[in-house]
Amino acid sequence: MKSDQQDEGDLVDTPRVRDRRTTTTVFLTPANVAGSLQPIGEDVRKTYRVDADVYADFFGRHHIRVGYDREDLKSTDVHLYNGGFAMDVFFRTVPGTTLPPQAYAQTTYFGSGGEYGASQTAAYIQDSWDVTDTLTVQAGLRLDQYNYKNRDGESYIKLDDQIAPRLGFTWDPRGEGRDKVYGSFGRYYLPIATNTSIRAVSGEDFHVEYRAVTVNPDGTLARDANGVPILGARLRDDAIFARPIAPDPREIVNADIDPMYEEEFILGYEHQFDGGMFDGWRAGVRYVHRNLASTIEDTDLGHGGVLDRYCARTRDAGCAIVDDATANDRFSGHYVLINPGKPIRLMLDLLGGPGGDNLREITFTREDLALEKAKRKYDALEFTFERPFDGRWALQGSYVLARSRGNYEGAVKSDIGQTDASITQDFDAYFMAEGGHGYLPNDRRHTLKLYGFVQATERLRVGANFYAQSGRPYGCIGYHPDDPTPGNTPGAWYCVRNGVPTLTPRGSEGRTDWVTNTDLNVTWDIVQAREGFGSVSAAVDVFNLFDEKAVTRVVEQGETGGAPGIVVPSYGQPRSYQTPRSVRFTLRYAF
């Protein structure tokens, strides 16, 4: 399977440049958006699979299945900001300095490119064992192996010991086929997205420059022919968020890294009623528990002071100051892949910095990293019922009471819209994780669903689908007071309250609206199924029948990007709404 993505358009080569010296933002170029564009992008996926089934009788009936599958992945990518950079001009104190307030340009550069390969293989064996006529046991093992390569074709992370047990059972306690007690336990290993290769091991350039600008006597900015302000002297050292050096894999991946996996436990009961007004109906209840046992994320060795703490602890000779730069300065913007909350071993040249020639093993303790373990727990109690179709009507529904807590949403970070799988900013530095434990964005406490249809006539069916779901929690995202080089996107659980940066933990500021939605379906069988021809039907679907307009997301960033301390006036205001009413017409031929 192959997919292509290439960004094109009139403004691909035009940078977004804004004059933000006042409360009114003025765009100085035709581009009003700064995005990570992909002028070259291609993904190729090849899959192979083989399975075999064996049936046997010994101590009961067995259905044994074995299998093997493999995926070969290749991603080609070039990404950069439109125009190569994004610029904002401010009038205030330059962040990280004691300079008097002045006009200056804050310019962000971001981009990289290359071709990245990966392979994912799995072998499994499972047995469905009918121990008795009323008890079935399912047991299995799965071995997953992942191998990811950088743009030079070198393996930078290879995990081959991922053994996942699976165990389940189904029991009919009365042997009448109307009751079922069931349960299961499973471990599920999670692969790494190729985006991790593109972002983490490509030698990506991501830095911010702070430079003087010239203001004309009339207050306008001196600009070139393209409308971009003419830049003067640097006002401070660049803020480095990633260095354009393709690293040795040993410099960026913990030698003792553990794979990512989640464990799931389910226990449930179902009953089919016999006789009375609920004859044939089924009802059930089940409990679901999921726990994220391990994950892989990235952290910056310099941005959060990891090297400062290491040097203070060890007095390592490699921590010497060279050209006014500490080891922490040299490794600011050097991201490494870790299991948050665990010590790590890397090969580094502390004196030479990233890409240095004199690599040696460096061990960072949990105290050096100052990061908590990634946590995510989901618990749910689900009640279900079903009234099977009897030729006239059918109805089914469910109610789920759930809770999702932790300090890690997952491979993506929806509260700021970050889709960088496995390299979100949650663990970039200790201050990004502070206050991060709480109710996660998918903590939908209550969910009610109903679905039913009526066979109104021999040819006419009318159905409806309804759901109601409680809102998602949100916090306030801003800049941490300990952040030495705040970037363009706020990401800490701090916001300005009464002029002071204040801890605002995840999920502590409120919840979005309840969402209720009703869909309607009407189907008319034009030609009913008959041998040798098939059937023809026409349908009308109305989605969100009552055109409800619940707020599904709010603005969670409480401080202005690139401007710490400046409150966002729209914080807490609607950012997205429920999908409006729409109608779909369908003509279907089935054969």
Image (tube, rainbow, N blue to C red):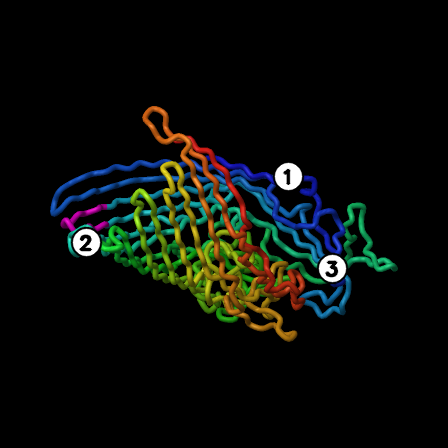
On screen, residue 298 versus residue 106, left or right, reads: left
Q: Which residues are magenta?
A: 127-138
Estimate the x, y position of residue 472 in percent, counting from the top left: 49, 61
Give the residue type that dot 2 points to: Asp
Corner quadrant of residue 328: bottom right
The quadrant of the picture occupied by the N terminus is top left
The quadrant of the picture occupied by the C terminus is top left
Tell me which label, 3 or 1, sits earlier in the chain: 1
Estimate the x, y position of residue 67 in percent, counting from the top left: 29, 40
Q: Which mark is residue 8?
A: 1
Residue drawn at point x = 21 percent, y = 46 percent: 128
Magenta span contains residue 558: no
The residue to which callout 3 is attached is: 20
Labels 1 & 2 near each other (Cβ < 8 A) = no
Corner quadrant of residue 23: bottom right
For the residues labelled 3 and 1, the Cα–Cα distance comes to 28 Å
Q: Residues within 10 Å of mark 1 (few under 14, many from 20)?
A: few
In the image, residue 291 above or below residue 194: below
Tell me which label, 2 or 3, sits earlier in the chain: 3
